[in-house]
Amino acid sequence: MRLRCPICGRTYDEPVQRCECGEPVEFEPFKGEPYIGKTVWERFWDFWPVKPALELSLGEGDTPLVKSKLGDEFGVKLYLKNETVNPTWSFKDRGTFLAMSHALKVGYRAVGTVSTGNMAASVSAYASRFGLEAKILVSESASDEKLRAVSVYGGEVIRVYGDYGRLYFESLKLGERLGVYFINSDNPFRIEGYKGIAFEIAEDLTSDYVLVPTSSGGLFRGVAKGFIELYESGLIESLPKLVAVQAEGCSPICGAFKEKKTKVERFENPETIAKAIANPYPPSGNAVLKLLREFDWKCVTVSDEEIRKAQGELAREGLFVQPASATGVAALRKLNLPEGARVVSILTGSGLRTLKTAPAGKIRECRLEELENCLG
Amino acid sequence: MRLRCPICGRTYDEPVQRCECGEPVEFEPFKGEPYIGKTVWERFWDFWPVKPALELSLGEGDTPLVKSKLGDEFGVKLYLKNETVNPTWSFKDRGTFLAMSHALKVGYRAVGTVSTGNMAASVSAYASRFGLEAKILVSESASDEKLRAVSVYGGEVIRVYGDYGRLYFESLKLGERLGVYFINSDNPFRIEGYKGIAFEIAEDLTSDYVLVPTSSGGLFRGVAKGFIELYESGLIESLPKLVAVQAEGCSPICGAFKEKKTKVERFENPETIAKAIANPYPPSGNAVLKLLREFDWKCVTVSDEEIRKAQGELAREGLFVQPASATGVAALRKLNLPEGARVVSILTGSGLRTLKTAPAGKIRECRLEELENCLG
């Protein structure tokens, strides 16, 4: 299996993480056929770059596709891919599991990541599960309380003071030297794991549009690669249109796309409630930009107010998500999609992780003796 | 379909919630055969008392069974049934969905529940999903912060001042009068929904023991009924032994069992970190007691210290659960099970809901310039 740089085209036979040109590398496309199996790993066995360590699986993937009424207003059929029911309650687990399978096979004793939220928890959990040490690097602004849901898994949590963007690249460099395998947001194995989202969607329905909350670009690239491989394997008849959704307050990819630039520039002074997609200088930004151009896909931004509204609407459908996960539904209002289009929005992570910012309802008070009045 | 009181034997043709004698009623046993289907609702279609409203499903059930190393020390093969990946992150969703299907079919416009934790969130979420009003009655001690994860779904949250145990019975009585269908902890439809846990376990392996965290007794009764129906339908060759696990600090059922009483008595001054199973006067206590006696099953108590330890061990397997969900694993130490026994422990709810009490690890501090030292 070879890795290839989607930007400059260089290829690599060893498992590097990034190209000499600075861009992320990716595995050359897989082709295959589906099998019968209980897990997405088994059913799409031909499509993974490493044998999934099934005996260590926590049951990641195979998440429900839920029918939603929220598309009615816009004349589309909306389905929600609920990634909040993964083992650490975000889509990250799919990529973490596959990258961890690689790390174990190659013989690493320690793994790491740079993250403050979903990915930190995911890597910490799977490292313990796989019997590997974990070095979880978090930014100086991460609160102790938030980190409780990370450190509980047993990984070593290290709060790093300094430029968070630089930390991404430093960790890869130092990790290589010190034998710590860093599974950051666009690690090539991680990207492969996200393909399962596309595979499962395709098993359930023929989608016209897929809305993807986009930060580093890792999820977007993984979902895109999944659909492309299905198409090139003759398993689907056409590609859905992918929509990268970003928060207005941190939209470096949509900005570059709109201004027809070939390189994503650092977004100055990012500010949004959708913290999980607030990467101002996305390491896979240029790769996403290239996909958007090549396939004539879309990039859409949504305001914090629109995100909050969509978060509330989703909760009233029974699904409590993080602000970042509500951006897809928020984008519906902006997209003006064709009547009857089948649209899938990916719900990336659980609202329980960002409880403090959740849109809370009022609480009434009542004495037991007056319960009849209170209920009436 | 008839309801029957498991204690006095009276039968009812209308869907009452409790028997005249005060005990909970349950549906007479179902017999059937399994079908091919993606969801547990479809595969065990013969076994539900109401047609599941599949078009409104949020994907509850069909949770992973995860292999664990934590049985090795005790010479048993341990499997963890991970109910924390349900739509509102606890097993409650299975029962809520089925009871809600009934409420919708019968024409109720409002539903309710008495709970402060998992069940409150679950009923609030599904009520919104089903387009029904929700009256969520919580105890006076429930904190505003905890209730944020309940009110977000849009149900009406009412804090009731007064005896919490009495509230359970008052809600049923008033609900009937006011047309609010209360789906409390041992509602007969709710119990039926929990059977899916037994069905899925049986699909995956032949279990010798199933460890069930036990509070009101609803979950225990549902899992027991599921296995019994499989057995009576000829789908499994023998019944596993069920183990009711309670916290030492609130163990009314184990207490009555040990003292060979036929009635559970109120547990005075309950005190445990396992809040989700701290019901001092369990409404299904006598029914559980009868099952334990009839089948020669077990009841075991575990201390807060043992629970905390098991919670940490589970997190190091990659599964972050509530203290109540760790009681099964904590009980392994007490049980002295036969060598090689296949044991399933049910993980009832996500640790994110009880984050404040989670066993947190230390957080190191590091300057970016010194990262190499920090990683080494």
Image: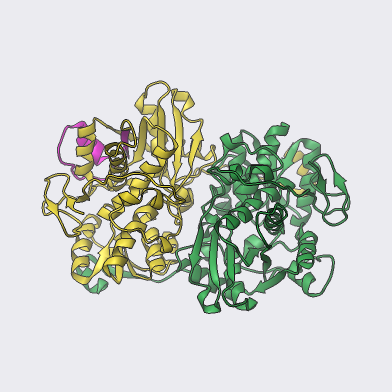
Chain colours: A green, B yellow
- Reply above or below: A153 against A282: above
Q: Check residue B266 for magenta coloring.
A: yes
Residue A204 placement, left or right of B331: right
- Nearer to the camera, B289 or B334: B289
- Reply above or below: B24 against B345: below
- Place residue B297 in its image quadrant: top left
Position of the N terminus of chain B, as image quadrant, is bottom left
- How far across and how far down the image is residue B89, in percent? 45, 53
Residue drawn at (68%, 72%), measured in percent from left and top? A300
Residue drawn at (63%, 60%), measured in percent from left and top? A276
Residue B273 seen in render:
no
Residue drawn at (75%, 54%), measured in percent from left and top? A162
Residue A12 placement, left or right of A206: right
- How far across and how far down the image is residue B214, in percent? 31, 42
Residue drawn at (39%, 38%), measured in percent from left and top? B202
Counting the numbered discs, the total is 0
Q: Which residues are magenta?
A: B241-269
Q: Check residue A213 for magenta coloring.
A: no
Kindly give the residue lying farthest to the top in the view shown. B339
- Reply above or below: A322 against A104: below
- How far across and how far down the image is residue B111, in percent? 30, 66
Residue B162 seen in render:
yes
Position of the C terminus of chain B, as image quadrant, is top right
Residue B358 placement, left or right of B48: right
- Nearer to the camera, B111 or A367: B111
- How far across and how far down the image is residue A222, in percent? 69, 54
- Nearer to the camera, A373 or A189: A189
